[in-house]
Image (spheres, rainbow, N blue to C red):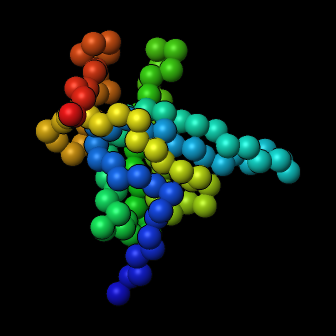
């Protein structure tokens, strides 16, 4: 059976949530931490059930009018932390339809 490793540095999240992913960036012999904030459009994490090695989640943001998506592996050593900044209220698990929306139509309601 495949061993699941606990991920304490990652908060519980689901699609529709806005998360801040702190990634370790290596430039030559220097390292720095870069934050990437956006909506989770696929993948979820629950501490009760850790993801398998190789599982990923996708975070999307719009930067200067251009949509940027980042595929983040759960078990990467370059992921410092994942913090949830806002909970979203959505009815499906893959939010790929957001790619075709802009402005107010691309907003996700907040879960209270």
Seen in the picture, residue 6 relative to 21 is either above or below; the reply is below
Seen in the picture, residue 99 relative to 35 is either above or below; the reply is above
Quadrant placement of the C terminus: top left
Residue 72 relative to residue 2: left or right: right
> Which residue is situated farthest in the front direction here?
112
> Which residue is situated farthest in the right direction here?
29
Residue 8, x across and y down, in percent: 47, 62
Question: 60 or 111: nearer the eye?
Answer: 111
Q: Residue at x 48, y 33 (%)?
A: 37
Q: Residue at x 22, y 26 (%)?
A: 109
Q: Residue at x 28, y 20 (%)?
A: 106
Seen in the picture, residue 112 relative to 67 is either above or below; the reply is below
Quadrant of residue 15 in the image?
top left
Residue 81, x across and y down, in percent: 53, 51
Q: Residue at x 45, y 55 (%)?
A: 10
Question: 100 or 75: nearer the eye?
Answer: 75
> Which residue is situated farthest in the bottom direction here?
1
Number of disc labels:
0
Residue 63 relative to residue 32: left or right: left
Residue 77 relative to residue 104: left or right: right
Q: Is residue 55 visible?
A: yes
Quadrant placement of the N terminus: bottom left
Q: Is residue 43 visible?
A: no
Residue 26, x across and y down, in percent: 74, 48
Seen in the picture, residue 91 relative to 53 is either above or below; the reply is above
Residue 32, x across and y down, in percent: 73, 43
Quadrant of residue 103 in the image?
top left
């Amino acid at each position: 059976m495949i061993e699941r490793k606990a991920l304490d540095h990652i908060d519980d999240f689901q699609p529709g949530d806005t998360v801040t992913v702190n990634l370790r960036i290596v430039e030559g012999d220097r390292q720095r931490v870069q934050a990437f904030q956006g909506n989770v459009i696929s993948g979820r994490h629950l501490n009760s059930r850790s993801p398998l090695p190789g599982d990923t989640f996708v975070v999307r943001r719009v930067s200067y009018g251009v949509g940027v998506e980042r595929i983040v592996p759960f078990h990467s050593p370059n992921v410092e932390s994942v913090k949830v900044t806002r909970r979203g209220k959505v009815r499906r698990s893959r939010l790929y339809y957001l790619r075709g929306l802009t402005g107010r139509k691309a907003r996700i309601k907040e879960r209270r």
